[in-house]
Image: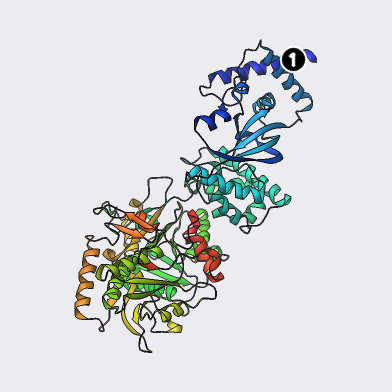
Amino acid sequence: MSLRLSAEPYTEYVKYMRLGKKEKEEIEILDDIINENHITTVGEMSLGLVQIPAAQIVGTKTAARGISFSKSFYPILSEKSEFAQKWISLYSSHMEEGIREPIKAYEFMNKFYVEEGNKRVSVLKCVGAVSIPGTVIRILPARTDDKENRIYYEFIDFYRLSKINDLCFSEEGSYARLQRLVGKRPDEKWNDDDRMNFHSLHLKFKTFYKDKGKIHSGGTVDDALLTFLRVYDYSELLNLSASEFKKKILKSREELKLREGSIPELNMSPEENASKVINILASLLPMSSPKLNIAFIHEKTAETSAWTYAHELGRLHLQKTFADEIHTSSYEEATEENVSQMIEQSIADGNNLIFTTSPPLLKGSLKSAIEHPEVKILNCSLNTSHKYIRTYYARMYEAKFLMGAIAGALTENDRVGYLADYPIYGMTANINAFALGAKMVNPRTKVYLEWTKLKGHDPFETFRSHEISYISGRDMITPKLASRYFGLYWDGGGYPINLAMPVWHWGKFYEQMIRKVMKGSWKEDEVSDATRGLNYWWGMSAGAIEVICSKHLPIGTTRLIELLKNTISSGNFNPFAGVLYSQKGIVQKDMTREFSPEEIVTMDWLAENVIGYIPEMEELVDQAKPVVSTQGLGAKQGLGGRA
């Protein structure tokens, strides 16, 4: 028995030694990393006895300890050395009764470096241990503006709440997002059951995801986990069997290739990628059925929501334009909780093209699209990147620039008001475009920004106290709550006078989208980059956005707006071109440069002539939070707050 045990560990040592000698990179030395990179540290913190993820043990504390191991902690000294005999003896002991004594290690930037117990780590990593018990001291680096450093301090905040140390994300905001996705408040601590449940799910995901093959380019397994949790509810996943869990990973494999926080590819006009046109509709659908069965799923009703009303007008335009070629139907009062069931019902009703018309319906739309790849599903939202659905929106900032020019030309005290509702992607571009338009015709104009979705806040109080009479209000009217306080209006005489209004021409948008499907150019729009989704972001050039001027406008102002409208529609003018200043300083110095569409979508600053700020989530009323959690400026990068 003893001879067999002594022979087997010797053979194992030789095997691992040969693997170690094949590795060209040397093991990491913590002292060298800190000294050679001139890293400033600001103290140490004892974490006590913890389970250290074996994969995150990457080196030794000192160089003297590191000469015996390869980068992966394989032994590299001769099998005849005294070190080899000790390693073999430790291996034999582990095979018989296990290694129980904790190691001592330092944690730095979420990686672990062994001070005592290097041979124990080597043996345990060689036999495939998932974690190793150890007494750990954390070395804190000084805070810097480096991305890796910022992510690390986000991890420290997360660890304080969860005591989970085996997560590695590559994008900022990920730890806070995970806290939210598992159903925890931002400051809520985890208990033992929380940790046990998460560890079980985490291990299951890593096992099945690695079985599947590749990790998406540039990301980590945990980045993919975060994407997975954005598709499926955490509580739902906890109750799945292993086979059901694996099936969901396999079905969502393309979605998991996306980088967390990735910006979608923007399709800027209906003509993009339309050169190769083939009519594939007949091969896709039976000739005996309508050409297309199209469902519109709305969050609210057309009577109570201006947004739904505008999309319903678009649906009616479609039905009138295409007559018997298509059939449309409408489903109302969808919620985050029931949208998947509504989509299932619409598919059961025979629909093969589905539009969900607001951002809170995005997650349910995505889940349904994964389950039904034969159905085209689009969600009306901006700057969300998904592989199984496409998103769409319109470039309202173009109209807002014109509205700002009107306000700047008419104001008599150089002050105008701007009412905004949700601090979401696209809204900041709208505000800044309005401010730049006003400044173009009147350099002294200040735009007073007020938010209608703040708790216990009267936005009109600011306008009254600053004697502001020209106000950019809501874009649309609600049929059941008709009001004259919409568009750009003058409110200085007790009764508003409407001067101009922006129009979401969803009918024109949907018409051109349907023509894409019918002609076959839908297929040509597919994104070749596996890490990005596709967002249709059409504007005035496509007829998706319009500005209607009132007869109350001076003739000269009306002519100016028509001129600007034509230059924007033709692509000869970009409101975000040349030197640009934010509230905090210069944003762009180059007189000849234009902001790219991606820069406009992700804009997180306010123009220098805006008086106001971007609110935080906790300042908003509850009704606004579902929209902002999906589309808000903080949803990807943790942005927002007083400028």
| Residue in front for this viewpoint, 549 or 446 | 446
Outermost residue toward the top in this view:
80
Give the residue displayed 44% in from the left and 50% down from the top: 262
Query: Residue 567's spot in the image, x, y percent?
Result: 21, 64
Q: Nearer the viewer, residue 520 or 39?
A: 39
Disc 1 marks which amino acid? Ser
- Total numbered badges shown on the rendered structure: 1
Name the residue tied to disc 1: 6
Residue 339 x/y as whole percent = 53, 65
> Which quadrant is home to the C terminus?
bottom left
Image quarter where the N terminus lies is top right
Estimate the x, y position of residue 402 in percent, counting from the top left: 28, 70
Q: Is residue 572 left or right of residue 431?
A: left
Residue 487 visible to the viewer: yes
Which residue occupies 51% across, 49% down? 172
Dot 1 falls on a residue whose secondary structure is helix
Crowd rating for badge 1 (residues with CA inside 10 Å; few <14, some 14–19, many 20+): some
Identify whether 433 is placed above or below 149. below
- Residue 240 appears in the picture as rendered: no
Is 29 drawn above or below residue 190 in the view shown?
Answer: above
Which sits in the foreground, 93 or 554? 554
For this view, does 573 lie left or right of residue 523? left
Q: Quadrant of residue 444?
A: bottom left
The one of 512 and 304 positioned closer to us in this rendering:
304
Q: Is residue 140 left or right of residue 98?
A: left
